[in-house]
Amino acid sequence: MTNYSETRRQSLHMAMASFALLLRVLTWWQAALCAVTAFLFNLFVLPRVGGASLYRPSDAARGYPLGILFYPLSILVLILAFPRRPDIVAAAWGILAFGDGAATIVGTRTQGRHLPWNPDKTFAGSLAFIMAGGLAGTALAWWTRPAVSPLPPLFFTLGAPALAAIAAAGVESMHVRLDDNISVPIGAAIVLGGLALIDGASCAAAWAWLPTSLLYAVLVNVPIAMLGWRAGTVTVSGAVVGAVIGIAVFGFAGPAGWALLFASFVAATVSTRLGLKRKSVLGIAEARGGRRGPGNAIANTGLAAFAATVAALSPYRDGALLAMVAALVAGASDTVASEIGKAWGTRTYLFPTFARVRPGTSGAVSLEGTCAGLVAALALSALALALGLVKGNGLWFATIGATAGSFVESSLSATLESSGMLDNDMLNFINTALSAACAVALAWMVTR
């Protein structure tokens, strides 16, 4: 493919965001129809009008361009997920188009310092992502703001896209083969959707107690993070990220939320150390002797910290706390199931085919590990109930959500982790996100 140019491809990638301007005047179904049309155009027409020159070598070898097809599909998903919020769709679209495009162009043209966790990415590329994506997301959110009723708060329009761009840049920097046209808009949409729940009245009410709560959070979490590092349970960077997450959970969800966070960490850490000798002999022990790094912390508890923030700053406290609980329960119970299965599982199978495999295989489940995970999920959910974080059936919603998320993660792990499409941290994040969504959906269906 001598005519291929990455700069040309990324320029078109960014130019396509101009169609986001139409979201101000289109209905959601009209916008969805346009996204479907764009997909069909990219699939059938673009290659015949010279678009094949935009194919990367891997696309040419495959015979069709996955990235160019995923782009309109991701926009379609955004439209269907937020039919009444074209500003969120537009902001995520701008972050995808300009953030990802700028990161690729800058990253390939500069020889800056590479990211420690991904040698294929540079700090310059990630900074370009944040700046270009944040500006484009903010501009498009502001342009489509008049199409939303009631009008979104100005602080959301001007601030949320920047925060979403930071989160999406982190997703884009991960060392996985999942196409950025999928992962980036989903990451941005999660942040934008959560921040859209925050309102001024709730923020004003929280101001009466939040500064004091955050002060106590710092005093509690910084020493504990240092002790965890000295005890060898976390790496230095893991301790720093863990402290930030702990401060957020304690500050926004109070001591009860932090107690559940700490219990989930203890459950995961203890289960990792159990049967360590057998795991080491089999070559399936956790890396770094089970010490948790920053990726582990973000994947298993990052969403919980975000949900705790939404709980404190929005009128949807109960739902956000349920999402926080389900995410924490999912992260811990999945680790317990995996580690107990590796330590004492007699027979392990792939889910959902149930083909028998050796212990430690990606996506493998065992009866012993599954039972241990269920017990851990129920115990942690019961603790959340006792702490007043959830009410009544919230115990079952969190347990069912965590269990469902764990099985979905096992299925994805068996098919996508071995191929390098997803790594363990991204799978864990998907697990916590699906578990939280499932728990909240169950609560909505039962209580509506």
Image: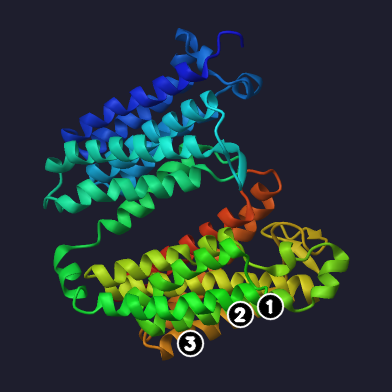
One can see residue 160 in this view: yes
**In the image, what residue type sits under mark 1?**
Ser
Q: Name the residue carrying label 2.
A: 267
Q: Amino acid at mark 3?
A: Ala
Q: Nearer the viewer, residue 9 or 27?
A: 9
| Residue 416: % across, % down | 64, 47
Quick check: 258 left or right of 131? right
Instruction: Tell me which numbered mark, 2 or 3, is placed earlier along the sequence.
Output: 2
Q: Secondary structure at mark 1?
A: helix
Three-letter amino acid code of the residue under disc 2 = Ala
**Residue beneath disc 1:** 271
- Do residues under tags 1 and 2 come within 8 Å of each other at their CB atoms? yes
Where does the C terminus fall, quadrant-wise? bottom left
Which corner quadrant of the image does residue 191 belong to?
Answer: bottom left
Q: Position of residue 443 (x, y in %)?
A: 36, 73
Colour mode? rainbow
